[in-house]
Amino acid sequence: MWLTFLTILLNILDLTLPLLVGIAYFTLTERKIMAGIQRRRGPNVIGYMGLLQPLADGFKLFVKETVLPTNANIVLFVLAPLCTFILSLISWAVIPFSHGNVIADSQLGILYFLAVSSLGVYGVLISGWSSNSKYAFLGALRSAAQMVSYEISMGINLINVCLCVGTLNLTEIVIAQLNVWLVFPLLPVGIMFFIGCLAETNRHPFDLPEAEAELVSGYNVEYSAMGFALFFLGEYANMLVMGGLTSICFFGGWLSPFSIGFLPDGIWFGLKICFFVILFIVMRAILPRYRYDQLMRLGWKCFLPLALGLFFLSVGILMGFDWLPN
């Protein structure tokens, strides 16, 4: 029993530690790319070309004093960032990096992912309510409404993928794309899913919960030091996992785009995740922010009917040609 527990713990650490390092340097990559697009230098002082800047930022947040608002509910105020951070990490449990390289190769991987991602809204709501601040509470309400609205269309898009493949297992979804990636027959579904990922992670142009002009940073406005750092890490971990899920469901996961793979499977998967997170950054640099009514109209009046229509179209084509998987 102890040996099994130790093995599981080592597997978790083997995933978590590289993930935290990846998140740290993802923030540096974002600042460098944004600086290049805006024709400025970006971080370039700490270490060679600023390579130690993420470590300096993390150390600064670690040693800062945690400020607890006087009228806040202290227990919930402290638990909210922990909830957000832990949920962002356990989403990775079903993500396969290569064939057999996954912590939990569940037959209900998609369902597990949707369940965990839907729980993320609780950390946001708890943080906004427990802060006892009107700005934090308004930001939390915005974020909750936004996440719930786009989770529905994202779930329908994932059901479309599962219908075409015939399984909820993420490893089997990748193996089913040996001949053709699903982004080609399901191109509109893939585009909608990626846009939904932007809204789900509160990224530009859908970063309304953190709109600095009107909300002074949104639901995490009262947080400092490690509380803010945990929200920050959770948000960027969610971006990485959304990039990974997009790669798995539409771009063949670890599969090489060439007939002969000249790189290991895990490298291909990492490169695809890097491609999508760079798209996240570029969207932030080039697109203006939506108004909140435009955001909700897009989710409920455009994406939801379109996702349902594409789902029924897929069902009709598969049943008409008798292509439904067993």
Image: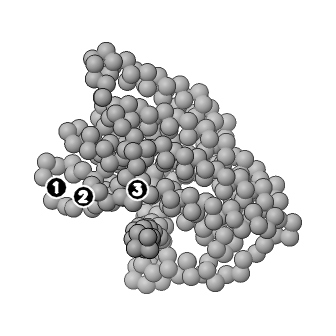
Mark 2 crowdedness (10 Å alpha carbons): few <14, some 14-19, many ≥20: some
**Lower position in the chain sequence, tag 3 or tag 1:** 3
Q: CA distance from mark 2 to mark 3?
A: 18 Å
Q: Amino acid at mark 2?
A: Asp
Query: Nearer the viewer's eye, disc 3 or disc 1?
Result: 3
- Residue at mark 1: 261
Tell me the SS state at disc 2.
helix
Q: CA distance from mark 1 to mark 2?
A: 8 Å
Looking at the image, which is closer to me, 13 or 234?
13
Name the residue nearer the viewer: 315 or 12.
12
| Dot 3 alpha-carbon crowd within 10 angstroms: few under 14, some 14 to 19, many 20 or more | few
Please tell me whether mark 3 sits on a helix, a strand or a loop: loop
| Residue located farthest toward the front when viewing the structure as drawn | 1
Which mark, by number, is residue 69?
none
Q: Identify the element where label 1 is drawn.
A: loop
Q: Are marks 1 and 2 in contact (CB under 8 Å)?
A: yes
Q: Position of residue 174 (x, y in %)?
A: 30, 45
Residue 121 visible at all: yes
The residue identified by callout 3 is: 104
Q: Which residue is identified by label 2?
A: 265
